[in-house]
Amino acid sequence: MVDLSVKIGDLTLQNPVTPASGAFSWEYADIIDLNRLGGLVAKTICREPRFGNPTPRMAETEAGIIQSIGLPGKGINYFLENIVPEYKKFTPPLIVSCSSEDPEEFAVLTKELSIPEVDVVECNISCPTRNTTGGNFSLNSEHTKSVVGKLREATDKPLWAKLSPNAGDLVSIALAAEEAGADAVCIANTFLSLKIRTDNFKPALGNKYGGMVSPALKPIVVRMVYQCAKEVKIPIIGIGGITKAEDVVEYMLAGASAVGIGYAGFRNPSALTSIIDDLEAWCDSRGIERVSDLIGAVDDDMEMDTLNAASAGV
């Protein structure tokens, strides 16, 4: 029997598979058994109600989708009164993603979410269609450190920082989040993208820019997870392009303790539980008793000098 449990700080997940924020709802219970997931991740909420971005909000590409939803929602009070009770009908820990354009309001929101029913606060400091000081704080290490520090002071809940792949030096951002008190980092949010329609020469999205989600991005994010895992001591949740159990394994070998799945769930919600089944079967077929043994287990003792590697032949 494979032990699929993993630890993220003091929190134990029954398996490393969680949905990604914004790609999941408690209403998935009509299709899959939510009690089988490692965690339940609510859509990013803001303190005040938001209408979201102008339509169109999604555009297809050959390799995935670009979306610019704009964090619509009914605000903190509605969330606490109506959404949290729905999630608490299930046993996995509730991970609540939240965002704000103002650091002080962000801290207030984090404090308001620090209730017994919420197990983890995921601070989304990486919305790709916002600027450096207006919600996408994780493009800059000083902004990251400042905002995460304020949120750390506002809550005693586990605090996960969701980072942006659009940062020039993601390792320094992850280190800043760790130094400011984050208990884990989520790597990564979506890639800022643009699609232009050829029939009318206009951007395909009402907000012009959007975040790209695609299986094609997985090797890029795996590289980011690997680089950050070499430097930070806190756990990493890998997010990006996961469609099968082997993708989960790859992220864990690179250093992730758990993963978030978005794109695959969009296409087929039952992919979440199928991946859990396949991960267990993958480990069992190889005699791996604990999936946690995969974390950071990549065999990277390889020749790094290009000329020496080439001369070694195959």
Image (cartoon, rainbow, N blue to C red):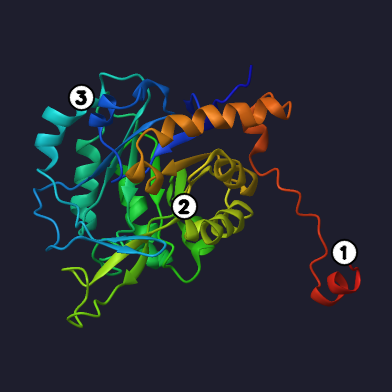
Q: Residue 110: give its label.
A: none
Residue denoted by label 3: 86
Say if mark 2 contacts mark 1, CB within 8 Å: no
Q: Amino acid at mark 3?
A: Glu
Residue 145 in view: yes
Q: Is residue 238 above or below residue 2?
A: below
Image location (x, y in percent) of residue 8: 50, 34
The residue that appears at 35% across and 22% down in the rendered structure is 33
Residue at x-position 55% and y-position 54%: 225
Q: Quadrant of the N terminus?
A: top right
Q: Residue 63, relative to residue 122: is it above or below?
A: below
Report how far apart the C-alphas of labels 2 and 1 lie in the structure. 30 Å
Q: Which residue is mark 1?
A: 314
Judged from the image, the secondary structure of the residue bearing numbered disc 1 is loop
Relative depth, front residue between 295 and 286: 286
Nearest-to-viewer mark from 3 and 1: 1
Circle 2 SS class: loop
Q: Are there few (<14), some (14-19), or many (20+) residues within 10 Å of tag 1?
A: few
Amino acid type of disc 1?
Val
Q: How would you rate the neighbour count of disc 2 (Cα within 10 Å): few for under 14, some for 14-19, many for 20 or more?
A: many
Front residue of 23/234: it is: 23
Q: Which residue is mark 2?
A: 241
For the question of whether residue 183 can be seen, the reply is no
Residue type pointed to by label 2:
Gly
The one of 130 and 137 positioned closer to us in this rendering: 130
Q: Is residue 122 above or below residue 54?
A: above
Dividing the image into 4 quarters, which one contains the C terminus?
bottom right
Q: Quadrant of residue 116?
A: top left
Of pointers 2 and 1, the one earlier in the residue sequence? 2
Where residue 137 appears, as percent x and y from the top left, is: 33, 62
Residue at image point 13% right, 46% down: 73
Q: CA distance from mark 3 to mark 2?
A: 28 Å
